[in-house]
Amino acid sequence: MRVIIAGGGTGGHVFPGLALAEELKKRDAVVEVVFVGTEAGIEARVVPREGYPIRYVRASGIVGMSVFGKMRAVMLSVLSIFDAYRIIQAVRPDIVIGVGGYASGAVVFLASLLSVPTMILEQNSAPGMTNKILGKFVDSVCVTYQESMSFFPSDKAFLTGNPVRERLLKGSAAVGRRLFSLGEGLFTVFVFGGSSGARSINKAIVECLPHLDDLKDRVQFLHQTGQADYDAVRNAFRESGYRGTIVPFIYEMGDAYAAADLVISRAGATTLAELTVLGKPAILVPYPFAAGRHQEFNALKLQEMGAARVILDGELRGETLAAAIRELVLDAATREEMRRASASIGRPDAAARVADVAFSLLRQSSPSGARHAV
């Protein structure tokens, strides 16, 4: 069986795709998985590292672009159709699965027109433009939140949760401390703002350090900054005297999570899926420009359930963040309540559920097991 997993741009799209690929391979070792993305997306460096082949389409986002940027995106969208056809002809997939992002659009749409079974994953409560359009053409849609069901035809939509990589569930705190040179017995704050970092979070962390000086001997940081702010944040930590490790990007997220007592992050759908599967107390700073404010809504939902604290990006200050960190460092009972609440929300079987939908779709579309002609 050959599978195309199309999409990317951010880790929020790529990592669920990798989680699904792992599940498919676990069920059938001879399954061939080929990823399709763009050369500019995070998938270009992450997917090959995971051992999967990747092919590229020429595509770019439209939302938030300048007039020139939108014109360029439209031109690339046309070219991406040709790229998608070439890839589908070469791979001859039994099924095409879109995991979100503009890189998925042409591949999934064209596969649907060519009568190849298709499905998409919708990680957010409010679908983006690409998935809203694709939802009209694909055979199945796997959603993370109940609220998403109403955006898609009822006979196509399945509530599965957002797939999380199995290795995240097997992370080791001891390995994480050794890998990131963290001290044992110290309260570890794990900070990241997504695969490219988040400037407002990076800035607030630096500003909060003086307000936590009395906890300096009890707290250490593991901070993924993104490339742009790496030098500035690393220098600030060196000057402050705090213990910890500052890195531009982390591949070994399972071990990083395992070593963490508290996570500070954005509130992307994949991040929330990971936090809740692992039951990690968190301070969430939703990205303020997310489509439909979905990060804010999802983060507030976790806060209402007692699984997280939320600080809106416009209200994020060093002193405010320090107060939230201080509370959770000093109050073990509150952290435990948050851990339990978070774990109760998580869906560790999401990848299995999505795989069930995929195999069911294949059985329905090709009872004899014959490959679809393209």
Image (cartoon, rainbow, N blue to C red):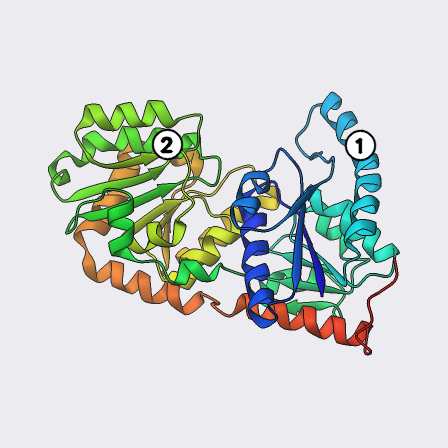
Q: Categorize mark 2 by other alpha carbons within 10 Å: few (<14), some (14-19), many (20+).
A: many
User: What residue is rendered at 58% in x and 42% in y?
Assistant: 43
Quarter of the image that includes the N terminus: bottom right
Is disc 1 placed on a helix, strand or loop?
A: helix
The residue that disc 2 covers is 202
Q: Residue furthest bottom?
A: 367
Count of numbered circles on the image: 2
Q: Residue at x 83, y 57 (%)?
A: 112
In screen coordinates, is 96 left or right of 182?
Answer: right
Of residue 57 and residue 121, the one placed in the foreground of this image is: 57
Give the residue pinned by disc 1.
74
Q: Amino acid at mark 2?
A: Asn
* Residue 197 point in image, percent of width and height: 44, 35
Taking the image as shown, residue 27 lies to the left or right of residue 255, namely right
Residue nearer the viewer, 160 or 355: 355
Image point (38%, 54%), residue name: 254
Element class at badge 2: helix
Q: Amino acid at mark 1?
A: Val
Give the image location of residue 132, x and y in percent: 73, 52
Point out the image quarter for the C terminus.
Answer: bottom right
Q: Position of residue 64 (x, y in %)?
A: 66, 31
Distance from Cα at disc 2 to Cα at disc 1:
34 Å
Foreground residue among 203 and 79: 79
Asked if residue 87 can be seen in this view, the reply is yes
